[in-house]
Amino acid sequence: MKKLFIILCTLFITSISAWSDEPWEPQEYFSPDGKYRVIDQTGGLISKKWNKETVLFTVYEGNTLFDEIKIAKVFKNPRMVEYVATVSHFHWGCFVSIDNEGINLLDNEGEKKYIFETKEIQSETHQSQLTYDELESLINKALPLVKNKRDVKKISKALKTIKMLFGQKGINLNNGHNNYDLFKSGKSELKIINTKGPWKGAGSHSVKTAFRLKTSEINISFFITDDDCDLYIVIHGGGDKENFKGRWGEDFDYLPERFYEFNTKTSYVRTGDYYPD
């Protein structure tokens, strides 16, 4: 999907360039809070004579120059800039949007973000790494609070599997509502969903990120939450059966879900089994 989007950007810019020999007219954008003004210097095109000092964006805080975003900062290897758009220019990428946190970019290396606070380029992989580090830290704080040894083993194994899958190549998809990263290896699958707001199935907590892990042995969802709790875990089919029997001895019961609700800062934990609707 990334490649398709880049190709479409390339075709769009190529069509503009084909009709005009005039240089790109710089475009001006503002962050929603009005704090930053961004000047797009290239419109996705750079001259074949570019160098590492070529400026792609200029950022102002009020009327004061805040930063110049040069090509050497955006690309790990500037010589990897590809996609010839015209006879005399290269297409380096696309300006996607701007928010109060920074500038969202898409280039031939993937999705990236320029962060105003740090003046650094943060790649999508780096964002996912920060999220994984937060999950690992929360789980390590939560595990001593879990009394059920079977669940400790499942959660620990799930964390190791997530770490393994995280090293695999991610496939970035969009399900129409939430962006997510998908990691696969054999029969194991990890979906990382970045969102914020009420999340059904996470105890009605405000969820920042959800990790959904499915393997041939375990099915667990981890939710990094942002309210009175900071971690919510659902072990799908991990609860204890109530051994409900029918009139003729039929086993009508099935394994319920088991949840764990944590506030690792206060060592709070609540758990229970339930049957989903």
Image: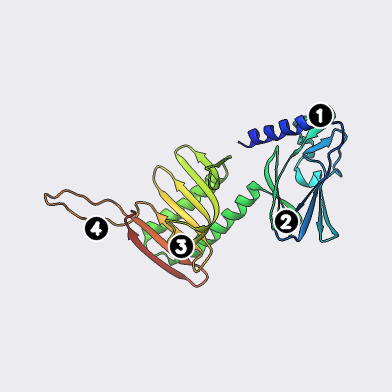
Instruction: Tell me the CA gap for discs 1 and 2.
Output: 31 Å
- Judged left or right of residue 200, residue 265 is right
- State which mark lies toward you, 4 or 2: 2
CB contact under 8 Å: marks 1 and 3: no
CB contact under 8 Å: marks 3 and 2: no
What amino acid type should be assigned to the residue bearing mark 3?
Answer: Leu
Which residue in the protein does label 2 denote? Answer: 31
The residue at the far bottom in this view is 266
Which residue in the protein does label 3 denote? Answer: 143
What amino acid type should be assigned to the residue bearing mark 1?
Answer: Trp
Q: What is the number of the mark on residue 242?
A: 4
Sequence-earlier tag: 4 or 2: 2
Instruction: Tell me the CA gap for discs 4 and 3.
Output: 26 Å
Mark 1 crowd level (few <14, some 14–19, many ≥20, 10 Å Cα) = few
Q: Which one is nearer the viewer's eye here, 87 or 14?
A: 14
Instruction: Tell me the CA gap for discs 1 and 4.
Output: 72 Å
The residue at the far left in this view is 248
Q: Secondary structure at mark 3?
A: helix
* Percent of width and height locating residue 177: 53, 47
Q: What is the number of the mark on residue 19?
A: 1
What amino acid type should be assigned to the residue bearing mark 4?
Answer: Glu
Q: What is the number of the mark on residue 183?
A: none
Sequence-earlier tag: 3 or 2: 2
- Judged left or right of residue 199, residue 238 is left
What amino acid type should be assigned to the residue bearing mark 2?
Answer: Ser
Q: Is residue 49 above or below residue 143?
A: above
Sequence-earlier tag: 4 or 3: 3
Sequence-earlier tag: 1 or 2: 1
Sequence-earlier tag: 1 or 4: 1
